[in-house]
Amino acid sequence: MNYTAALTLDEALAALAAGARPVAGGSDIVVGARQGKAQLPDSIVGIHRVAGLDTLTVGGDGLVLGALVNHATIETNEAIVRGWTALADGSALVGSPSTRNVGTIGGNVMNSSPAMDTGAPLIVLEAICELRSKSGSRTVPIDELWTGPGRSVATPDELLVSITVPALPAGSGSAYIRLEYRRAMEIAVVGAAAMVTLNGDGDVADCRIALTAVAPTIVRARRAEAALAGKAISEETLAAVAAAASEEATPISDLRGSDRYRRHTVGVMARRAVEGAARRARGEHLSVPLNRADGIGAPLAGGSA
Amino acid sequence: MATVIEKRHIRADGPEKVTGSGRYTADLTLTGMLHAKFLYAGVGHARITRLDVSKARALPGVFSVITHEDVPDVQYGPFVQDRRLFCTDTVRFEADIVAAVAAVSAEVADRAIELIEVDYEPLPIVGDLEAALADGAPLVHAEWESYGAADELVRDRNDASYSSIVKGDAAAGLEAADIVVKERYYADSSHAAPIEPRAILAQWEGDKVTIWTTTQVPFDTRSGVATTLELPENKVRIIVPHLGGGFGGKCGFHFEAHIAVLARKTGRPVRLVFSRREEFIAPDRRREGMLIDIETGVMDDGSIVARRARVLIDNGAYTADSGFFSQLASMHIAGPYKIPNVDVSGRLVYTNHQPSGSVRAPTAPQACWAIEQHTDSLAKAVGMDPVEFRRKNVVQTGDVGPSGQTYDTIGLIDCVEQATALASYGQKLPADEAIGVAVGCWPSFPAAAGAYVKLNADGSGTIVTGAQECGTGAVMTLRQLAAEELGMEQEDFTLLYQDTDAGPYDMGATGSQTLFNNGRAVVDAAQQLAAQLRAMAADQMEAAPTDIVLADGHASVKGSPEKRVSIADLAAASHGGELLIARGSGIPSAAPVLEGSTCVGDVGVAAFTAPQFSCHAVHVKLDRDTGVTRVLGVYAAHDSGTIINMQGAEGQVEGGVMMGIGQALTEGTVYDDDASQRNAMMLEYKLQTVADAPPIKIAWIQNPAADGGPRGAKGLAEAPNVPTAAAIANALSQLTGRTIDRLPMTAERVWETMHA
Amino acid sequence: MSALEITLQVNGVPYPVAVDPSRSLVSVLRKELGLTGTKEGCDDCECGACMVLIDGQPVNSCSYLAAQVDGREVVTIEGLAGDGGLHPLQQNILEEGGVQCGFCTPGMLISATALLAANPTPSEEEIRIGLGGNLCRCTGYQKIVRAVKRTADELAKA
């Protein structure tokens, strides 16, 4: 295996053009090799030191995340927690403190897993990815990026350099929640993200919902959105959201859950994500990640220590 | 009055464990060392029609490739000799070993494994327990009748061990009962999953082999190597560096002989280090799956009159130490209850799954999970509160248990009272929360054990013991026992242990037996040393030996504390004459007598020596929309006799409870139809994390056991693992209105139960 | 396969080594550097026994390429305490009884160190999340959490 460490974006793009695979933290690629899923590539370029890829800026365009921004930064960044909360919810659930430190948003997104925790948040936040190669640059809306498990529209010589997330309109809130069997070291069985904008009457002016781990890629749930748009948040509309999300899901059966169970629970997650997003839209504080805010995953009141 | 030592000492092996300087087996290297890898069959049941290792042998860097042709044709196994080191012509589970390689690096060994060519002709998979017992079922061992086996075993084709316990007339009792409740439960198999994967390093010097290995049972391992390689035991030395956990998973003899053969063939030290996947699939130590059918008759007043039950146990492909599981499971299904009429039986069923073996309280957590849900069903049937029902029916001091054992002083009822009190049982709870209660029992295992205690010229002490430390601290606590006998401090002693050439025989870190048996041996040796010291001191101070008191590092005359001599001075003096060396073993506790019952296939566990009892009350919350269960608190009461090391004892309960929560909710092996494990990785076989751990509160019922170990102690390491899953199940049953008949009680299964 | 010349700065000591670029950090620490305190329990970032600090942050060294650590500061369990003696976390985990088999202990202590560096006064929930990547099969975690809490309390008073 050949390894080079790039210090500039040009060096990284040149290495990619020459056939190297980029590695930032390496969690997915090295773990994958150790599990025998895929051999390590013949050529790797370390991009962890590439100048300028680890910046996080908040401005008129909204949030711009360099590809090397890690989950630990995202989950604790005040602007993200306040303005793009679903993304913080997602990053806060990734693996363990170590994986959140090593794992980058760019690596997570380009791994193109239908179970990734930042994918549904980025979809409902309408993120735009910038892909760059030696020959140029292009932008791809995040919901057009993935084409299947582990696959995306990016060509091998393209590097995801940044993700831009527009600011949400006033009266908006977002949330991501997943079904998990443990409170740490988990992977989503199913998950859902929601972005909700409320109008002056408290009704839903706009909403977006995306579902995790129920299809070959993370998917937008447009029928669930339609069940909510223009309506008040009520038991009836929430039930309709859950039902629509379950109907739209096309899950498979695997070790983590059967298709029947996934189909049901993704509806539950969609409903909870909408509730969380709406409560945040109303200005209510729900801690990050939403999985630990209340309900079954909340911290215990008393301590044992 | 029980002796309780509250003083907390730092464990002797602690500093090296927290600084990273302590060596575990995989940390060891020797000059010229080669690396070993195994070729596993990768198919569940097949005939080998061709095996060609020539390409692997030709690969540069490969020093040896061995198969069944390179080892003596010896069949081994503690109960049934149904196993060989390598497959000959038949593969019986996916990790049956076909060949082994020693090469210059692990990477080269891996490539050599890939170059071995094997053709398999598939045979029908035996996976379902009931189908395996049906007439005409394919046999896992076609030649079962020719195998050597323990005389007590009752075997028949795919049934490797049938056992029954019969008392009174169960049929008549069920007929006479006011209500009969009949239920069926399925438990999946699971894993010990110690965090350290196993490792072995072997080196020959002349005709003697030294093997550093991750075993819980060094002497058993020595015997396995000696048997399979046809060596005398004194030509095999087993040394265990620090052991990174076992939980039964590292009991038994496994792969040491394979590595010894590779080392002998190559004339080099050879080391094997397992991957996590191998640790999951290869050892003959899986917690056994079970199918449990049970029916119990009760009277309207809540008294139990009869029980009939049948347990089928998934033995897997070979009989490891599982030969006693049928009887043990029968005992647990009979339960710690007063039942006049009992007819329970167990069968140990061969399948093409990984072999089962003793994992922390084998058979008990699964059987308890079934029987304690069943007990709640009985209580419900007669309209009694489940705790009230247990108060009425559990065995108490002087009662006769289901197998005819009369219980000496036991504290089960106290366990029930204290666990429920700790949990504030009966409190008003939110609609999605409940407290489940379950009782459990577990024997102590009397066995031979030996130790030497000696005092050096400066008065420091050395304990040389055959005992094995797997983390519990039991061996560490031997220092405390010696120090108490000799009036010294435990810090005055060092330990030499885990080396079969140094210490006398010990059964190992198995059966919760270390303090129970080796503690007795150390006390025996230390008492002899104390007698020697008293005699010397009496001589010096012109007093009667019986008037000499050993305390604070001195021997003094009773009533005249100013007349004293230091133990160090006595030790120095001994080096001019008779040395201060003592050996101890002591006589193991006798098994209780059984009266009024018949046991078929009796391998000795129908009588529970120094029986331990427990009650866990577990506070559970259920997410009804998803079936996800969260444990909010565990309240554990244990009668394990006298507690000798309180901090160590708490650690056993806390660890056992967490393992129990894992077994209850997230830990279960998933098999494909081809009998291969689908979740042999930590991400998919989910151990509980610290973020899941609830508060655990403990009450101790300290009745010194007359048939106990030192100070009246009983065993402890396994018992805390028994009733946790059962108590969680009972809480979930309250919340769902139905029993949860599959273990583990995954979120999906709980949800399906609610929607069945 | 060309070996890569890199320098690992481990526990304050520079180690110039030539390694195959596909090698994980843990394998180089254990084999070339002889620092076996860092353990391997699972091969895939699921147990935490291999945890080390890189530039002060916790990393599963089983799944991190040694090549990417060139020139960076690594702390392993062997470097946790200064000269002689024990780090307060080491002392407290012993006194509280949070060590049994000891195999998870190095990784657990590294994660605890990172946690306290980032958050000197963690709540119990924050400790549980902070140690969430370290599995322990022996202790049931109770005494480990208590040791970390006690260390935080002691350091806050000091």
Image (cartoon, coloured by chain):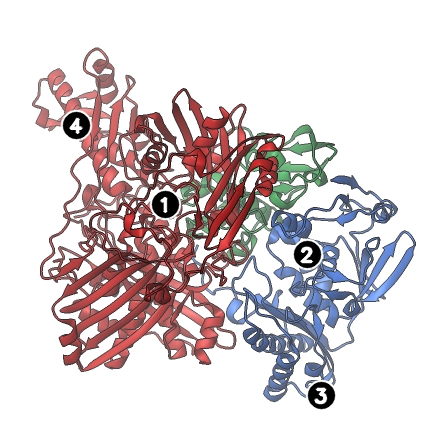
Could you give the CA–CA distance between mark 3 and mark 4, rounded to whole angstroms? 88 Å
* Marks 3, 2: nearer the viewer: 2
Name the residue beneath numbered marker 2: A71
Of B275 and B90, nearer the camera is: B90
The shade of chain B is red
**Contact? badges 3 and 4 (CB < 8 Å):** no
For residue B83, the mark is 1
Q: Relative to A40, is B206 above or below?
A: above
The shade of chain C is green
Chain shown blue: that is A
User: Do circles 3 and 1 both sit on a common chain?
Assistant: no
Please, what secondary structure does the residue beneath circle 1 have? loop
A220 vs B445, left or right, is: right
Residue furthest right as drawn: A135
User: Do circles 2 and 1 both sit on a common chain?
Assistant: no
Mark 4 or mark 1, earlier in chain: 1
Please, what secondary structure does the residue beneath circle 4 have? helix
Name the residue beneath numbered marker 4: B528
**Residue flagged by tag 2: what amino acid is it?**
His
Residue furthest top as drawn: B576
Chain name for mark 3:
A
Residue furthest left as drawn: B544
Please, what secondary structure does the residue beneath circle 2 have? helix
* Marks 2, 1: nearer the viewer: 1
